[in-house]
Image (spheres, rainbow, N blue to C red):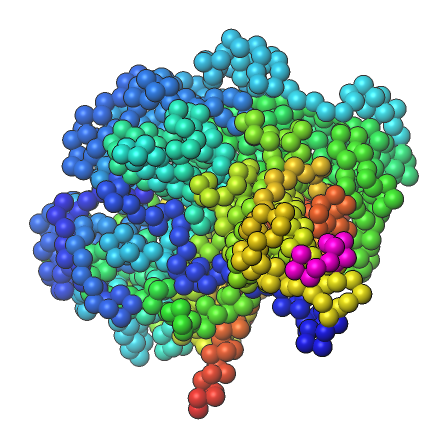
Amino acid sequence: MSKMHIKMKVNGEEVETLAEPRELLIHVLRERLDITGPHIGCETSHCGACTIDMDGKSVKSCTVFAAQANGKDITTIEGLGDPDNLHILQEMFKEHHGLQCGFCTPGMITRAHRLLQENPNPTEDEVRFGMAGNICRCTGYQNIVKSILAAANEMNAAKEAAQ
Amino acid sequence: MIPAAFEYHRPDTIDGAIKIISEHGDEARVIAGGHSLIPMMKLRMADLSHLVDLQEISELKGIILECQSVTIGAMTTQHELITHEELAKVAPIINEAALQIADPQVRYMGTIGGNVANGDPGNDMPGLMQCLDADYILVGPNGTRTVKARDFYEAAYFTAREEEEILTSITFNSPVGGYAYEKQKRKIGDYATAAAGVLITKEGGKCTHASIALTNLADTPIYCEEAVAILTGSDLSADVVEAATVAAVNASDPGEDNRGPIEFKKHAAKIVIRRAIERAIERA
Amino acid sequence: MNEMTPPKEERSEALKGLGCSRKRVEDARFTQGKGNYVDDIKLPGMLFGDFVRSPYPHAYVKGINTDAAMAVPGVVAVLTAADLEPLNLHWMPTLAGDKQMVLADGKVLFQGQEVAFVVANDRYAAADAVELVEVEYEELPPLVDPYKAEIEGAPILREDIADQKEGAHGPRRHPNHIFTWEAGDKETTSKVIDDAEVVAEETMYYHRTHPCPLETCGCVASMDKVNGKLTVHGTFQAPHVVRTVASLLSGISESNIRVISPDIGGGFGNKVGVYPGYVCSIVASIVTGKPVKWIEDRIENLTSTAFARDYWMRGKISATKEGKITGLDVHVLADHGAFDACADPTKFPAGFMNICTGSYDIPTAYLAVDGIYTNKAPGGVSYRCSFRVTEAVYLIERMIEVLAIELDMDAADLRRMNFIKKEQFPYQAALGWEYDSGDYHTAWDKALEAVDYKALRAEQAERVEAFKRGETRKLMGVGLSFFTEIVGAGPVKNCDILGMGMFDSCEIRIHPTGSAIARLGTISQGQGHATTFAQILASEIGISADDITLEEGDTDTAPYGLGTYGSRSTPVAGAATAMAGRKIRAKAQMIAAYLLEVHDGDLEWDVDRFVVKGAPERFKTMKEVAYAAYNQAIPGIEPGLEAVSYYDPPNMTYPFGAYVCVMDIDVDTGVTDIRRFYALDDCGTRINPMIIEGQVHGGLTEALAVALGQEIAYDEMGNVKTGSLMDFFLPTAWETPNYETDYTVTPSPHHPIGAKGVGESPHVGGVPCFSNAVQDAFRAFGLKHTNMPHDHWRIWQTANKLGLHD
């Protein structure tokens, strides 16, 4: 089957690649663009390890075809912070032991990022409900929830300080 | 889990989409959010060679609220339904049901059109639409027609939609009175073990209008006529609620699966239906 | 002390050593998406492998046609058993002394079995070709129920060994029978039970499930034909053993094989075994001369690699009228699937199931385990537990509850009455183990007080009355469990894997400027070894943990070790780390003595330095010593500062804990709500409390999953019913409660730093605790026992059988 040109904005940069329409977005990111932060966990859109942000939505990239993603604006874990300037969620996950094997973490943080954009001041229940599309096998979620709530606090405090 | 190859189309009008479908017949399938279709394709259980992506068709998007009615474009996502503040006021049952569908990521992609059109008995929106007595607008090569949600479902994955038609929008009268969508499931992301949508309108201690529909309790959604008849005009006493619940359960026909045997499902359905009726009455 | 010297506490704190909640060094890369997992590895020219798998649980393979598959553009090869046979790789040995087909050799024995291996330029071409491999099967009747394995007319599964009367673990009484394994005194136990005042008996099924780490299994095999070197990156919990196996199977010298476990996305036992995918990738790389990647998908993971449990257990427990336990008799029918591929130490075909006397002083006991072949996937791994310890603890913790019902006693009191007493340690258990240390009564009393146990029982009694009056449809369960683990395998004298003694190792190099690198024979899968082992070392050698790099998983650089599973890393490799650190310190002391011009016996260790006794102003820090070791000639001492330790533990360690779960149960819908979960763990010396707490949260959540819904279920025709995450229950944040953690500290007397290990305790103790909560809710209505998983419909069924829906 012939390949098509896929143009996307990924982590702020315009990228272009050739891919079969059927290629899954997660494969395009990981194998064609070497963006290996998002992972493949279940392949049936249950686990959320492949979560990315696409046009402002949290999306499971194992359930999106490359062709569907053509023209989209995508942010992955790689686009959230850099080594000298970590995203506050990255800081808080480290601080509160919100990860163990690290496999779910990129999807988890990318999803949490969108959650806090939409609800900057969530309750614990709202965090648990809002994160229910991401499975973690190691942490039992308690410290993930703690990390996200702490990040929300920090972000709000920073916002207040800026005002 | 790798899907087979296909040709991809992204038309920007309904007519354009229908033209492609007409050209390729049963080798073409439309894709909305894709969260039912793509997993099936990855398991190679859906066979197609032309995929028609509806995302670019602006006519399929949007929520229109008129004084008495609601029209929702087929490509409206569950997330958009949930976050639409006006819709939440006009038809709060939509919000309540949509929040119980799948998980946050799936709700960003999953659309109401995809949910009602593919005929999966596990989907929540078909039952809800029967409860709301919604009309589905179908557009095909021969024009536009309307099918009632209550007449749309024939068997699991079989509906009144012709192969060359696209379900473009859903419309229903703004519900009044009390409402509830009650769902039992094993975990977030699961289909219902049993779910029920209920609408109740009360005036002067009497029920003036009622509607009950069930999800995943048969190979199609079920509109419970007999239960509705029992409630309508009644005083909504405990005995009436019990009788309506029993009638609704009798209308169900669940199959055995990993969620449990038939006997359990009927019992769970009874609880879920009763809770939904009671909650709708409370809110009426 | 010299005025310039910071106080002891300050220096101690600066080390970030034992006992502090040091933040994890691993997290920088993981939080930025820069972990390096197997599927992230991309080598030039890399090919992809994908399996054709059997749709049938039991069938003859009459023919395989690969023509159409080979015609798919990008397909390089399709391997079948016939291709592997000349290399003698169509079968491979299992860890349990059996052998297993790598690719179907004339027959398939479970649904999902590997039949052919397609190798292509990319995974899409491979997947397309898999669809086109034509396999002709002749279906055979499947054997699904292990109780029907030995009846007349039962299908014979393993025709390859049908005539062998002797297996790896003694006599076989039937072609579908694998072994009988016994422990304890059969006759005495039988007599004690016959003569007992009270006997409780129960049969319970510990259902088949799966570790299901978020990352599936996979590897990249790369044969460099120019240099004759084979490199295999893989999801291996025991990379060194994999190297040995690869060498034995391939004939390539171990020195020419490099096995690398990169970052691993969770293991929980799934990644201990050697799977056909690894063998096929290696063969394919040797055949094609190119790197070959193979990554399981989730369905393949759940249906073909490494199930856990599947034990049908019958227990009989006897006691005096007052409740003093006198004897325990246990029989297990163990469903091992199509090949005996259990990952246990060689001499223990049922793992450490003989820890099933639990935390109780039971004078007489007997255990027999019968292993059986069925048409199911092979495996039998220890899913977040030491070998079969979860099964053992579940059995005894259920038997205690059943006995409490028989005696009409409170189950907490019954436990307390029978605990091994503090002064009895080291305690010789009836089934052979010597428990190292414990203080069960203190832990139990602390737990019961923390949850206000009496108030819970009072509330529960009120709830029962309210239920009977029709005021509520919710019952309340108080789940108790007290567990003793046996971890840290293990002494080389009785524990080996494929003949390799189960020691572990650590090698340390101190650099001239006073930082260090340590390499271990283990491999972290999320446990945070790079953080915690550096802490152990920091306390031993006085160099800050932040200055110690830790490496694992590369067989070219790390010392040989048996890997990470069965909570053995802290007890064994952690001990090796401490011992290697002590060797460093011993040499450093000689150097310091030379530098300070005193006898080495005149020095004492003070956190991070050697100080001349009685002259605190005269000292040399470890950093100064390290520099001296490299920059000056010291008579009689070799330059450099390095050490290696291979640690053979004298005994296992025996962590223990006391858990309480409070649960509300809707008897109509079967929906459970965990109101409270309290977990007290005693893992001996605590290395990093933050990490311990994280391990407890995670282990409890995996326990919740297993107890409340997670299963690998087969229908009666041998089809897998729970092959994807739609049906295989992994709880999300929404279904998972918050946990309260607590601890006591009873150090292991034989471990260098007194640590016992904790990673698996919460799973081992958690499963019976959640299950007991469900069962306890129905005790007032006559329930004695009901099998897990306690999902909605099964709870409903329990309530229904008890007449609670009438």
Total numbered labels placed on residues in the image: 0
Residue C107, visible in the rendered structure = yes
Q: Which residues are magenta?
A: C594-603
The answer to whether residue C231 is above or below residue C176 is below
The answer to whether residue C355 is above or below residue C443 is above
Q: Nearer the viewer, residue B212 or C146?
A: C146
- Relative side of C360 to C661, left or right: right
Residue that protrudes farthest toward the bottom in the picture: A163
Residue at 41 percent across and 38 percent down: it is C258
Q: Nearer the viewer, residue B217 or C121?
A: C121
Q: Quadrant of residue A51?
A: bottom left
Image coords of residue C253 (percent x, y): 41, 28
Image coords of residue B236 (percent x, y): 54, 65
The N terminus of chain B appears in which quarter of the rendering?
top left
Residue at 87 percent across and 28 percent down: it is C196
- Relative side of C379 to C228, left or right: right
Image coords of residue C1 (percent x, y): 75, 72
Q: Is residue B277 magenta?
A: no
- Relative side of B28 to C217, left or right: left
Q: Quadrant of residue C34?
A: bottom left
